[in-house]
Amino acid sequence: MYTEAVMEHFTNPKNVGEIENPDGEGQVGNPTCGDIMKMYIKVEDDQVVDAKFKTFGCGAAIATSSVATEMVKGKTIEEARNITNRQVAEALGGLPGNKMHCSNLAADALHKAIDNYEERKKAREEGTA
Amino acid sequence: MRRIYMDHSATTPVHPRVAAVVNRFMLSDYGNASSVHHFGKVAREALEDARSQVADLIGADSPSELLFTSGGTESDNLAIKGVAYARRDQGRHIITSAIEHQAVLHACDALEAEGFEITKVGVDGQGRLDPEAVRDAIRGDTILISIMLANNEVGTLQPIEEIAAIAKEYDVLVHTDAVQAVGQISVDVEALGVDLMSLSGHKMYGPKGVGALYVRRKTPLQPLQNGGHHERRLRPGTENVAGIAGMGEACLLAKEELAIRNQYLLRLRDRLIDGIMSEIPKVYLNGHPDHRLPNNVNVSIVGIEGESILLSLDMKGIAASSGSACTSGSLEASHCLLAMGLTHEVAHGSVRFTLGRDNRQEDVDEVIRELPAIVERLRAMSPLS
Ligand SMILES: Cc1ncc(COP(=O)(O)O)c(C=O)c1O
Ligand code: FES
């Protein structure tokens, strides 16, 4: 059912955990099946230097979380925003059709974490202005 | 890798004795049971022997009360739609439960779309139906009650005897889906008092694609397909002689082994339940502790999701199943667990181990050994714990 890449990321997921004092964090949940994904990012000079996740979901959800955190590391905020669900799925050699919404979850969580980072940044800038 | 199969409610391995019978009726005695020649007669005899073997296992008055079908799904459809169509002049109301197998639920949905009315009686937190709730659901135009004998997910056994007794008071027919029960526990149609009962070969060490429907004498039934004279025209089509003979052998085997099988499985089941409960924190047993199939262990492991547990178990060579939305294909959690009042999250973390006669105590102990580490790893990844 799953590609080798999915199984590899499921078995040895990268970047599991939380980041203390993250620069951004985002959580998404899938209302129909009740899965939850949480992403944390650390940003320096508008570049994502670290990303971590915690996921409650199926093998695909764990694998997409893992690969998405890998993909985002080293990217600028601009580039990170452009990571799409499809790219996440492609990085895993594809997902079964009924699992595509799990890859939605990973990119969505990432984008939320970026939103959160930008909100915090804006708040800081306004605070200092 | 040594593989441990603990998904016997999905399907069972065919017993070698059954396989030998199937083999014989495929390779040597392959006649059409309707033919007049020797080959036909041998096939006919095999068919009628199998009918007697099934009848014998379930305590039917006469083998003629059994029809062979293509499996549990067809038996359920034939029972429910067959009675509904035959009795539509007397009423259009059917009662079933919220935790039936999809074969029953979707057959009812199809009838509903045709103008029948369906009441789905709920269950308690352990998956048991209250017979009085069934009584309350009965109306003047109720023609059929279809309630399963044993649930396929949580193994809960239903009080069918009491339900059938109530139904009799109101002249309502009773069908029970006994697919998971037959071969596991002693099932007697006379003691149960049911009018129709579904069986499936592959859940009892028989072949897939063969089943039977018990139809008490004089029960009105309209066939769902038209064709030749086979199975008293109630189920036309050249009989699957090899499969049917195999199912007969599986029934004979069940009859011989039932008492020991039952005891043996109970011991393994309780060892597995106790082991999981004592080794892993925050685990709930789903289903009824006592009114339960002897081979069913269904637990919810809080904070993690079923499919990821199954994948992890599979990597250790252990085959199980789950009622998680992520494994359902439809991305909805098991209707049965939700009907029992489980939250989506807890239903999500359900794992079902169903034991069989081929499982050994070492198998159970290996699951108890492997599962805690799997749970710990997944919980460490979960935002919920
Ligand atoms: C309770 C119940 N009813 C019906 C069926 C369907 O039987 P079959 O697979 O033979 O069509 C099953 C099997 O999954 C079952 O567990
Ligand atoms: S998280 Fe539910 S299907 Fe993937």
Image (tube, helix red, strand yellow):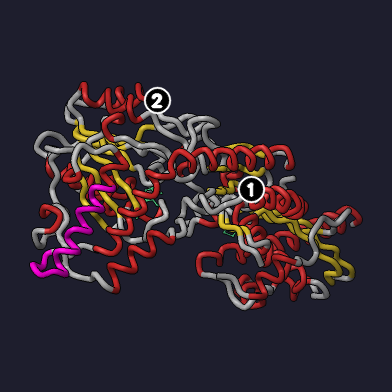
> Residue B370, how many percent across, how many down?
72, 53
Q: Could you tell me the amino acid type at mark 1? A: Gln
Q: Who's the residue at 24% across and 63% down the image?
A: B241
Residue A105 appears in the rendering: no
Kindly state the secondary structure of the residue where label 1 is placed: helix
Q: Who's the residue at 51% across and 39% down the image?
A: B294
Q: Chain of mark 1?
A: B
> Residue B262, how many percent across, how many down?
49, 40
Q: Quadrant of the C terminus of chain B?
A: top right
Q: Name the quarter showing ligand 2.
A: bottom right
Q: Who's the residue at 56% across and 44% down the image?
A: B347
Residue B147 appears in the rendering: yes
Residue B16's disc number: none
Disc 1 within 8 angstroms of ligand 1 (CB): no
State whether residue B326 is above or below residue B30.
above
Q: Could you tell me the amino acid type at mark 2? A: Asp
The span picked out in magenta is B34-53
| Magenta-span inclusion, residue B126 | no
Q: CA distance from mark 2 to mark 1?
A: 35 Å
The residue identified by callout 2 is B130
Query: Is residue B284 or residue A65 the one in the foreground?
Result: B284
The residue identified by callout 1 is B361
State whether residue B346 is above or below residue B129.
below
Residue contact at pointers 2 and 1, CB within 8 angstroms: no
